[in-house]
Each structure stands twice: as C-alpha cells, then as structure tokens.
Amino acid sequence: MLNIRDIIEATRGRLVSEGESEFTGVSIDSRTIKSGELFIALNGDRFDGHDFLSDALKTGKGAIVNSSRFTVHGSRFTDRTIILVDNTLLALHDLGRYIRKSFNGHVIGVVGSNGKTTTKELISSILGTRMNVLKTMGNLNNHIGMPLSITKMDKDTGVMVLEMGTNRPGDIDELCNIAMPDVGVVTNIGYEHLQGFGSLHKVRDSELEIAPYAKKLVVNADDSFLMEGVNAKFKGDVITFGIEAKDADLTVKDIDFSDDGTRFIICANSGCIDIDSKIPGRFNVYNSLAAASAAHAIGFNLYEIKKGLESFTGVNMRFEVRREKGVTFLNDVYNANPSSMEESINELARFADAGKYTGKYKRAIAVLGDMLELGDYGIAGHKKLGKKLSDMAVDVFIGVGPLMALAVSEFRGKGICADTSEDAGIELSKIIEDGDIVLIKGSRGMRMEKVMAAIEEDGSKKSVDFAGQHRG
C-alpha cells in the first residue's frame, strides 16, 4: 500500500484535497485504472493525462497532477486525494526511486542492443523457482515503464528484474538513478538507434552507463568490443558467459538445434547441467547463458537454472516458430536492427540448410521491413543486407519500405518490393507453397505483424470460398 505521507515525501508534492490516505497501486491510464489506485497525469507526445483526470477519478481514489494544470479553487474532486507537483514525470521517477530505496533484495538491470526482453524473462523464470519476482512489464523499459513497474513492488517481492532501454546517451544513467541495480547484465553491443547515438562506440558507452551502479556485471565474453569497454570502465566483479570463449565463467557445449528448441549443456565452476530449451536459435543460447549467469551470480544453483530455462516457452513476436497449413513461419516481428537482423537471417539459413537434408523445406523466404533509426548508416546498412542475402540460402526476398527496396536492388535472387507490411502479406500469400520456411522481421514502426495477419486473412477467405463451392 502507498500512503499519502510516503507519496508526499517522495515527490515533494503539496496536498490540496484529501480523500483516501492509502492506495493499492499507481496508474497512468484512465482506461485501465483500478479502484483504489492513484492516477499520475503525465504529459505525453500525443495525449495529456490531465485531459482525462475526470475519467480517472471516477474509478481511482486520487491523483498526482501538475500544479500549472490544476485549479485548486472550485475543484470538483474534493472527495479525492489530489497532490500537486511541478512535474508529474519527475514525480513518477521520484516515487519509483523512493520505493526502490525501501527494498533490500537484489535488483538486476538488463541492458544491451539485442535480447533484453527475452533475457529479462529468462532470468525471471529462473528466479521464480524460489522467489517472488517483480519484473518490468512486457517491453516497458523506458523512463515511464520502468519506474511504473517498480511501483508494483509489495511486501512479498524478493527480487526485481528490470529491463532498461536506450535511444540516446544518458538514458541508462537516468534509469539506473531510479532503479539502482546491484547486478547489471549486458547482453551485447550492436548497431541500434544510430540516429540517436551516431557511432557504435557511443552505443557501447551508453549501455555501460549501468557499470557505475552495479556491484556485479554479467557480460558476453564473445563480444570483444563489449569486453574492451568493460575492462576500461568497470572495476567490480565481472561474470562472463560465452559460446566461443571457453575461459568464460559460464560456457556451453554440445549445442543441438532443432525446429522446436535447442539442447545444450551449461558448464560453470560448480559443474555442468543439460538444458532442453523450448526456444530455438543460437542467439537464444546466448540469452539463456546471460540469464543463467545472472541467476548464478546471486546464488542460484544449476538445477534451479535448468528448471527455469526449460519451463520458459518464449516471448510473443520474438522468433516464434509458427506452422500454418504446411508453411513454417519464423515470426520475429517485434523489432530489428542490423545486428538482430543478421542473427535472424542466419537462423533462417540454418533452418533451410537442415531441412534440405531431410526434404522438410522447399524454399527459404525472407520478408523484411525497414530497419529504422539508423541515421547515416541506413542506406549502407540495407545495401549490405541485400548482398548478404544473395550469398545465403534465401530463395525469395520481399522487402518492405523504401530502405528495404535498396536491399532488394542488391539481391541476386527473386526480389519483390512492397510499400507496406499488408502489401507484403498479400504478395507472400500469392507465392507461398507447402514446405516453405518464411522469416518475417522488421523495425517496430513497420508493423510487420500485419504480414501474418494478411496471410491468415487470405487463408480464411480461401476456406470460405472452398466451403461455398462445396455447398453449391
């Protein structure tokens, strides 16, 4: 429960109307606020929470509002608790920090260019074998979502696992100043948000803003560029993981890939344990290693790690293997940058190569949307991608958006350009055949999930048409 005294102390706010003195939680959405919760009226890019204050207080029991947006005299909310602050976003940050300071358990911060959400979920799955875990909700890893997640802490919370995202220098530092992680996990460094960073070195520097806060840093030993930065910036306890780096603290051996998952053995100084993971892909072996290393760093044994890793079934829209009427789809549509795109394409090629020996797959098809926010690297990065696809076992390439059109122009196989993801789905539905394997991926702004929606809609229409003909 949050009480007025703590809220005012945390936010340095001014109480102008008192109704309820305790609140069951915090909400920033008037549509989903629950009875007993406190509404924080944030100013967004498209919406201003103050415009929905009346709606929020029909259900909620109080609100934190900007003093410049609220008139005390003549207020219609005299039966609700109203707290005035200079800036509601900073008030949310202050409240998250205040709650964090009252927490005595471990706080694990997860950063990196790729794999953050899956790694966060894997860590939570392991720690959940014997602790109550508070984790960032979904992919809410920014300056709003992360502190909002912290406000969900209750007396039973044993550990926090907080994903932290960055678009520009200073973002991770801002989030760490709220969360104060004692364990940091850096998955990797890659080409992400270059429009905001400008260079790969600045990406690394920004991700490593977590280093001054952490007592222990879990890092990918196979990423030499990351390790160079860690060795220069961090003097605490470093826990390493890797597939290639055999001197890492946690390593793997005997990796066996399949369409439905991956089998491998994790080895640490305390021994080895076999893992039968339900999530496919070499990059998910890395994510599993990162999660295992974080759990091991705070005292979890290999059997607990095995239980947590094997019970995890994946994250929605992140390299989901779906099968529809004889076609296998690698549905990896949540987001993309050059590093994650390369990993996913490698997996498409691996699936296709393995399938050729068994006769399982006929063709490999890549449906790829623009990789956004790459700045000056955008054109070169997409052309490089088209050339790479030409050298791999990819039979058909459907490019979505103007940047992917450049990639298609460099592709030596059958290439198709589409303006939108819906158009790509229509084009794909015309050519897919039983036995094809299809990768779908692109930046979040490209809404690549609409490719699958178009395929499913086309399949429904064909079913209806067939049924109608049969009745006739």
Image (tube, rainbow, N blue to C red):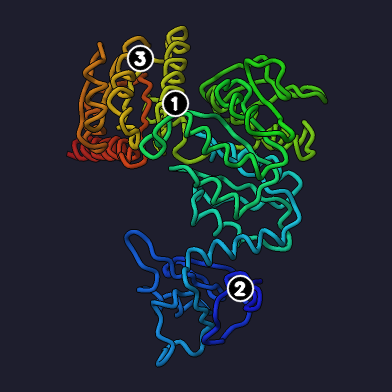
Q: What is the residue that sits farthest to the front in this orientation?
A: 232
Which residue matches tag 3?
Answer: 388
Q: Nearer the viewer, residue 177 or 370?
A: 177
**Sequence order check: which comes first, mark 2 or mark 3?**
2
Q: Considering only vertical position in the picture, is 343 above or below 70?
A: above
Residue 306, image quadrant: top right
Could you say where residue 123 lies in the image, as x and y percent from the top left?
65, 40
Q: Considering only vertical position in the picture, is 96 above or below 189?
A: below
Residue 405, image quadrant: top left
Point out the frontmost of discs 1 and 2: 2
- What kind of residue is marked 1? Ser
Left or right of residue 125, residue 171 in this image? left
Q: Considering only vertical position in the picture, is 121 above or below 272?
A: below
Which residue matches tag 2?
Answer: 7
Residue visible at 58% across and 73% down? 12
**Sequence order check: which comes first, mark 1 or mark 2?**
2
Judging from the image, what secondary structure is the residue with disc 1 in? helix
- What kind of residue is marked 2? Ile
Q: Nearer the viewer, residue 130 or 231?
A: 231
Could you say where residue 78 lies in the image, as x and y percent from the top left?
48, 90
Could you say where residue 284 lies in the image, as x and y percent from the top left?
56, 28
Residue visible at 77% across and 31% down? 302
